[in-house]
Amino acid sequence: MAARKRPSATNTTTAKPDPDKTISEPAQSDPPIRPAKIPTILKFFFIFGIPYFYLIFSHYKIDYELKKSILINASVSFVGFLITVSLIPVASKYVLRRNLFGFDINKKGTPEGSIKVPESLGIVVGIVFLVLAILFQYFNFTADSIWLVEYNAALASICFMILLGFVDDVLDVPWRVKLVLPSIAALPLLMAYAGHTTIIIPKPLVPYVGLEILDLGWIYKLYMGLLAVFCTNSINIHAGINGLEVGQTIVIACAILIHNVMQIGASNDPEYKQAHAFSIYLVQPLLATSLALLSYNWYPSSAFCW
């Protein structure tokens, strides 16, 4: 694994160009980034994808319409994977022109340690993800769907988070500000949430609390806002270590998908099933676009997320 180091303005000196060299030497462009590591992604697909779709289409008795929606979402996500893989090399040229790059500090002293690695390519993943989610919304949800408000609120929060990540790269936001901004970005989703605010007390603590179920009320939403701060910073702190930042996202997404499918298969409550399907509709595109980024971020990395 390797980390990155951004170029420092204090370490650079402005040299006057030599007129003779300027005329005689052609301008050198940055070399293209390494190709995507598709074989690594294919291995992951066979390890996770086959058991995942087996649970959906064979192991559990899931409604045909729900299966159809999950499959359509998976197909849209696959298209998003292909688009993201093709757009990252294009976007890398533009971020390099704007000096948004870093160096692999663990390769210092080697030829690879002086190669510019483009940063801020998470913006490509974010844009493709939002487009996929909006297109799926058009084909899957009706105008009177009870989940439409929360779905759009989730997209609004995700859009804020993407903007925050890109602004951090461009403006180098202080860490004190980073602690506040994710909670603000989570506000649309928290305000649109109309579900339960109760928690189940662990059985060993029931005799001391005197309750099996506790309604937290507004404290529940406060906790979720703080959780948004923790999640974003705990992932972002590993930015620059090859494959780790986006790799964590992929592991979490896989765990969420498996959990959702198991809950759908074990429940007979239609509303409960729709709640978990709602999560699948958002996580499948996230997994697909993150895998596309991982194909460039896997060691040795040729692109950094943020």
Image: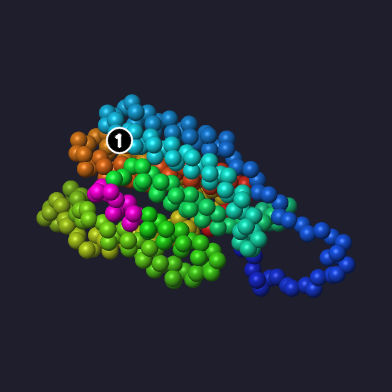
In magenta segment, residue 2: no
Residue 242 seen from this side: yes
Q: Residue at x 37, y 58 (%)?
A: 156
Residue occupying image coordinates x 15% and y 52% = 213
| Magenta stretch in the rendered image | 143-154
Eyeballing the image, is 36 above or below 234? above
Numbered label tally: 1
Q: Is residue 174 left or right of residue 5?
A: left
Q: Amino acid at mark 1?
A: Leu
Say if residue 253 shows up in the picture.
no
Task: Measuring from the top left, give residue 223's x and y in whole percent.
Answer: 29, 61
| SS at circle 1 | helix
Residue 279: image location, x then y, percent: 33, 45
Colour scheme of this structure image?
Answer: rainbow
Q: Residue at x 52, y 34 (%)?
A: 43
Q: Residue furthest top?
A: 58
Residue under label 1 = 66
Residue at the extreme left: 210
Crowding at mark 1 (Cα within 10 Å: few <14, some 14-19, many 20+): some
Picture quadrant of residue 234: bottom left
Residue at 11% from the left image edge and 55% from the top image edge: 210
> Where's residue 108, x and y in %?
68, 56
Q: Is residue 65 above or below residue 286?
A: above
Residue 73: percent from left, percent from top: 39, 39
